Image: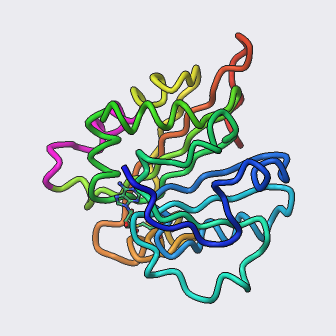
Amino acid sequence: MEQLALLAPAPGSEAWCARFNELHVDLGTGDARYALRLARQRADLGVVGVDTCLDHVRGHARRWPANLALVQCDAAALPDALDGRVNRISVNFPYGRLLTGLLDGDEALRARLGAVLAMGGGIEVRINASALAGTGHSLATAEEALSNVCRCLGCDSVRCRRLDAAELRRFPSTWAKRIGFGREAVAIEVVGGCRVDGAPGALPP
Ligand SMILES: C[S@@+](CC[C@H](N)C(=O)[O-])C[C@H]1O[C@@H](n2cnc3c(N)ncnc32)[C@H](O)[C@@H]1O
């Protein structure tokens, strides 16, 4: 799929990636609030926010931290320069193709995520209950589907838990807060830790 636009600083360049000790990709970044927070917390972390639509991002690129890059493209078409370099992937409250791609084990998406993930890297996915309407999934089957994605990506440790209203309200993304204050304030969180040279991947705290 075509990469539609590349906003400054150029995340497609190997030089940009090489400036950082670690890379984090936030898929379906929306207004990029979560990605921006991550970038502000750690200057040595390169953060790439990815979305098919970046119209909800506020502020001008000149005011973003130098370690934040926003890329407008499909999650299944991540730039090649990220290959083998990404230490962490987050997917917070996806909908549309990104949601169904994860739940249905879309091969193209899975292959691309597998290609960008570095040895020892991991993935964290959060899905709200209301997003599952019409997908044919319950919270339990969605947890199973996401656990399978983690295993297919080489994760040797997978942790599932539920997020309640209070946790959703505290979570630093716009959709989490919206869901947390809504009527069906529950979500699943699936976190996969990946293998490094045969050693079990560590799960984050
Ligand atoms: C509900 S919003 C969540 C935004 C943000 N993660 C948050 O927590 O506030 C879901 C986002 O997923 C994006 N999205 C849907 N399908 C996608 C795909 N195939 N590739 C990249 N982004 C996608 C949408 O454009 C939308 O911005």
Q: Nearer the viewer, residue 12 or 154?
A: 12
Q: Nearer the viewer, residue 140 or 1?
A: 1
Residue 26 located left or right of residue 186: right
Q: Nearer the viewer, residue 162 or 38?
A: 38
Residue 75 located left or right of residue 10: left
- What x and y, as percent, mark residue 109? 39, 39
- What x and y, as percent, mark residue 81? 64, 44
Can you say whether 114 is above or below 184 in the image? above
Residue at the bottom extreme, as displayed: 59
Magenta range:
134-146
Q: Ligand 1 is found in which quarter of the picture?
A: bottom left
At horizontal 73% and vertical 48% (from top left) the residue drawn is 14
Can you say whether 10 is above or below 161 in the image? below
Membership of 204 in magenta stretch: no
Q: Is any part of residue 109 visible from this angle?
A: yes
- What x and y, as percent, mark residue 197? 74, 13
At horizontal 36% and vertical 66% (from top left) the residue drawn is 185
- What x and y, as percent, mark residue 191? 54, 39
Please identify the quadrant where the C terminus is shown: top right
Look at the magenta stretch and give its main secondary structure: helix
At horizontal 51% and vertical 48% (from top left) the residue drawn is 78
Locate residue 117: give its quadrant: top right
Can you say whether 182 is above or below 42 in the image? below
Q: Is any part of residue 164 visible from this angle?
A: no
